[in-house]
Image: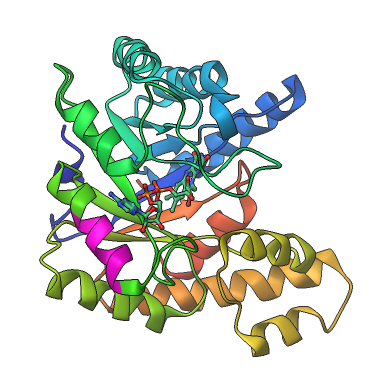
Amino acid sequence: MTLSSHFGTGKCALSYELFPPKTPAGDAALAANLEKLMAYRPDFVTCTYGAGGSTQTKTLDVCRSVKQQFDVPVASHLTVVGSTTGDLESYLREAWDAGVEYLVALRGDPPQGETTFQPVAGGLRFANELVELIRSLDMPFGIAVAGYPEVHQEATSPDADLANLKRKVDAGADIVITQLFYINDDFFRFRDRCVDAGINVPIVPGILPVTDLGQIQRITKLCKAQLPESFVKRLGERDDSQWQAEVGIEFATQQVQELLAAEVPGLHLYVLNKSQAALQVLQGVNWPRG
Ligand code: FAD
């Protein structure tokens, strides 16, 4: 299968994003949660790549084990942080040999303690260069790249950010997966602007159901995503994690329902290695089980 072939089939494609657990208990929890999530037969599953390449081996371990256990296509995220092109090529070879079919090709964030991204000598500067590198090799990976409905925080302007996204797609990306967002109109505007800019690949919304107010405020501060004020107010009505999860799941369910009504080509769920919120959202929108 190719990455593109999951999209435009008349049904909305489903993908889950995982991260590499840090402990054996985390591995076990992920395996148990995946078992439940697989009831919805995702089209593919992705696994993040730690800052500075810190989780390289673990990212591939997760990809391998998800593939072996569930026979579902897997995507490794890959950033250029701290890597020369030679390092990147070695990783790509290893991933290909491990049966990884797809990649989420990223620049990555500056390492902790640094405020601006600095390429290493012999490395790459932007994600479009990574896409070019991948396409220059003899491994026909499907490639997803990141898109920002609220504009990437380092972009000099929304138009410059869009031109950069186009550069990634023109270099050979098959789909765009967006940064998390909580205001659908931001996504719809972004989608329209992509079409106007001649970006004609599927634009897949990335959705993170909120389960904890403190956690989502930390995450959205880092990636500069807006939380609607009324949503924050409602979440803050009770300092009770179960209540906050219920409010967050209800919000995400409505958000996804509206996106589905607007015929998005796919849904990328940031499941954060948990299952309950994602399952409740999928159930809430009557997503067909496999
Ligand atoms: P780029 O597309 O390279 O863009 C970076 C900035 O440079 C943008 O402001 C852009 O407008 C500008 N720019 C791009 N190209 C050019 C150019 N040619 N000339 C001038 N300016 C340019 N991070 C991780 O560390 N690990 C992960 O696994 C991970 N997974 C992610 C998955 C998704 C779906 C998303 C949305 C983000 C993910 N991130 C991950 C975060 C991501 O690494 C950061 O958002 C990072 O700051 C930008 O990466 P990028 O690939 O979008 O960069």
Magenta segment, principal secondary structure? helix
Q: Is residue 25 visible?
A: yes
In this rendering, would 86 be left or right of 282?
Answer: left
Colour pattern of the rendering:
rainbow
Q: Residue 164 lies in magenta, yes or no? A: yes
Is 27 rendered above or below residue 172? above
Is 70 rendered above or below residue 261? above
Is 11 rendered above or below residue 29? below
Identify the image quadrant of residue 19: top right
- The N terminus sits in image quarter: top left
Residue 90 percent location from the top left of the image: 35, 11
Q: Is residue 265 visible?
A: no
What residue is drawn where x is 16% and y is 56%? 201
Residue 29 percent location from the top left of the image: 69, 32
Identify the image quadrant of residue 150: bottom left
Magenta stretch bounds: 159-166
Residue 94 percent location from the top left of the image: 36, 11
Q: Nearer the viewer, residue 283 or 6?
A: 6
Q: Nearer the viewer, residue 165 or 178?
A: 165
What residue is drawn where x is 13% and y is 49%? 170
What residue is drawn where x is 71% and y is 67%? 217
Q: Residue 269 lies in magenta, yes or no? A: no
Residue lying furthest right: 239
- The C terminus sits in image quarter: top left
Residue lying furthest bottom: 230
Q: How many marks?
A: 0
What residue is drawn where x is 31% and y is 9%? 97
Residue 271 percent location from the top left of the image: 55, 49
In this rendering, would 198 be left or right of 285?
Answer: left
